């Protein structure tokens, strides 16, 4: 079994669609290994999105990500990263496949309900950023 990371962004909580997203994830065959809600500060968001530092959208993204709580899920299933990216859809909700999370619940490229790890390397980094170094099941 493979693992991946899903982050529900502040807009998902504000829109009250957390349950719908988790239901979609479970129906797609993912097991939830860990789930936590956190309120990020600026340093947390900047660390998580460090790969985008210096890009035009970075400050706006950080501001959005600290505007409310976020929920992180450690997920497991075969081909987890690939399958979750397929379920999540394109970053731009207007370009996401119908039925994907971002197509259904996203507003624009920043306010798009979720973030999902795109590679094993980003998964390891993102899980460490969100859950820390503690042992996870």
Image: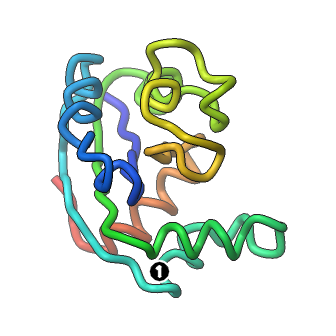
The residue that appears at 50% across and 32% down in the rendered structure is 102
Q: Nearer the viewer, residue 12 or 85?
A: 12
Q: Tally the marks.
A: 1
Q: Secondary structure at mark 1?
A: helix
Above or below, comparing residue 4 to residue 96 in the picture: below
Q: Quadrant of residue 2?
A: top left
The residue that appears at 18% across and 52% down in the rendered structure is 34
Looking at the image, residue 98 sits to the left or right of residue 11; the answer is right
Looking at the image, residue 62 sits to the left or right of residue 52; the answer is left
Q: Quadrant of residue 14?
A: bottom left
Above or below, comparing residue 22 to residue 42 in the picture: above
Whole-percent x and y of residue 62? 58, 73
Classify 10 Å Cα crowding around label 1: few (below 14), some (14-19), many (20 and above).
some
**Quarter in which the N terminus is drawn:** top left
Q: Give the residue at the far top of this rendering.
A: 98
Looking at the image, residue 107 sits to the left or right of residue 79; the answer is right
Looking at the image, residue 53 sits to the left or right of residue 104; the answer is right
Above or below, comparing residue 62 to residue 120 in the picture: below
Colour mapping used in the image = rainbow
The residue that appears at 47% across and 56% down in the rendered structure is 124
Q: Residue tagged by mark 1?
A: 44
Whole-percent x and y of residue 130? 37, 67
Q: Nearer the viewer, residue 82 or 54?
A: 54
Whole-percent x and y of residue 24? 27, 24
Q: Quadrant of residue 70?
A: bottom left
The residue that appears at 52% across and 43% down in the rendered structure is 112
């Amino acid at each position: 079994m493979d693992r991946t990371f899903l982050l529900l962004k502040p807009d998902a909580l504000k829109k009250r669609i957390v349950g719908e997203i988790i239901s979609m994830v479970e129906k797609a065959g993912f097991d939830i290994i860990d789930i936590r809600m956190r309120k990020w500060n600026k340093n947390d968001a900047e660390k998580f999105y460090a790969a985008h530092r210096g890009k035009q959208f970075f400050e706006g993204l950080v501001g959005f990500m600290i505007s409310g709580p976020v929920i992180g899920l450690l997920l497991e299933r075969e081909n987890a990263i690939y399958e979750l990216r397929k379920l999540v859809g394109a970053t731009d909700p207007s370009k996401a496949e119908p039925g994907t999370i971002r197509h259904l619940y996203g507003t624009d490229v920043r306010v798009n309900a979720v973030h999902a790890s795109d590679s094993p390397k980003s998964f390891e980094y993102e899980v460490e950023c969100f859950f820390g170094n503690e042992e996870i099941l």
